[in-house]
Image: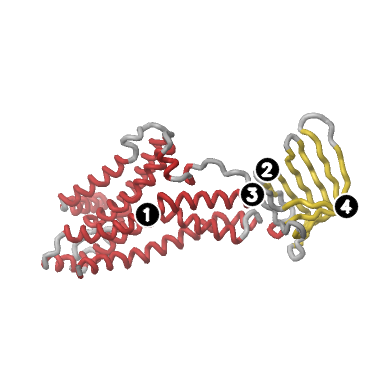
Amino acid sequence: MIIDRYLIREIIKPLVVICTVLVIIFASYSAARYLADAVSGLLSGTTVISLVLLKVVIALEVLLPTTLYLSVVIALGRLYTDSEMTALQASGVSVTRVLKAVFRLSLLVAAIVASLSLYARPWAYQASYRLKAQARAELDISRWEADKFYEIARGDRIIYADEIDHQRNRADGVFIQRERGDRVQVIYAKEAYQAVDEKSGKDIMVILDGYLYEFPRHGDRGYIMKFEQSALPLRPEEIEPIGYKRKAAATMDLARSDKPKDIAELQWRLSTPLSTMLLALLGVPLSRASPRQGKYAKVVAAVLVYAIYYNIGAMAKTWVEQEVVGSIPGIWWVQALLAGLLLALLLQPSLVFRSRRTWRRFSAK
């Protein structure tokens, strides 16, 4: 048990470091994607932070298995190069025992990945879609910029202002176009400011000294109205329904569906825990190295194997969606290939070293 705990501890050390680094990189990348919308005033800072956190939850489904796989290769590779694995084998610690220790750790990570894939990931997608829909439907003068058109609620409202005073939350030369069923409404006002309605307590936009033009899409019976003061709600009473989104659908809803795209999504969710365990176990034979090699000698080969596996998995999912491959074998043949590679490397350890010599000859040429 002491040796098992030692092996697991050595794997957990790089796992925590690598996972933290990957999460930070992914969060930074996601934040950069939303930065343009935040600068343009389409998203608030709070919304951007929420979306980035939700993206991280979604990405953990892939980051955790990847991190565990690389951690096994790095940790055991270090034990090989420092001759610790040789000493363990001389003490009677077999490869089977190492596999059992890695398998126990992979079971825990696979359970976390299953929870993320089956429940947390769909919830995160649903929450992100809802936040984006809410941001598209809301108005907020504090986030506007002058001389820029804003499309709100998927084109139902278009807003423009000549000048913006962010300190006073006021805008001059305001143009608003609204869709009112089969009629189009255009408002031009000299000034507008943001306030809170005393009765409802909701944010409103007070429009001063303007004109309202309303006319039908077909016909010529429109009218013009001048007003001194009017008010518009900054947030609609109801957010437009998001509709059916496959990635945000509940797992049980996917299980009851017979659509190819839903089947592919369901199989992808169910396959992630299995791939987590297979990748972790695959890291054991891939970590074999001689003492003369560096600590990270096998990382490049491990990354190459993972890249090929992930791309084949994504391709298999697309084939199921497009009905090129049926629900059986679906995407499970990819897991079968991974299991076959694992068995081949465990039964024929020399394949690892043969592949290394082949790679060196190829590189030399």
| Mark 4 vs 3: CB contact within 8 A | no
Give the spatial CA distance, label 1 vs label 4.
Answer: 59 Å
The residue positioned 59% from the left and 58% from the top of the image is 47
Return the residue at label 4: 228
Three-letter code for the amino acid on which mark 4 is drawn: Glu
Determine the CA span between mark 4 and mark 3.
28 Å
- Other-residue count near label 4 (Cα within 10 Å), few / some / many at <14 / 14–19 / ≥20: few
Query: What residue is pinned by disc 3?
Result: 136
* Of the two numbered discs 3 and 1 in the rendering, the one whose residue sits closer to the viewer: 1
Which badge, 1 or 4, is on the more N-terminal residue?
A: 1
Identify the mark nearer the N-term, 4 or 3.
3
The amino acid type of the residue labelled 3 equals: Arg
Residue 154 rendering spot, x and y as whole percentages = 65, 43
From mark 3 to mark 1, how far is it between C-alphas? 32 Å
Split into 4 quadrants, where in the image is the N terminus? bottom left
Measure how far apart labels 2 and 4 are at the Cα level: 27 Å
- In depth, the one of 76 and 123 nearer the eye is 123
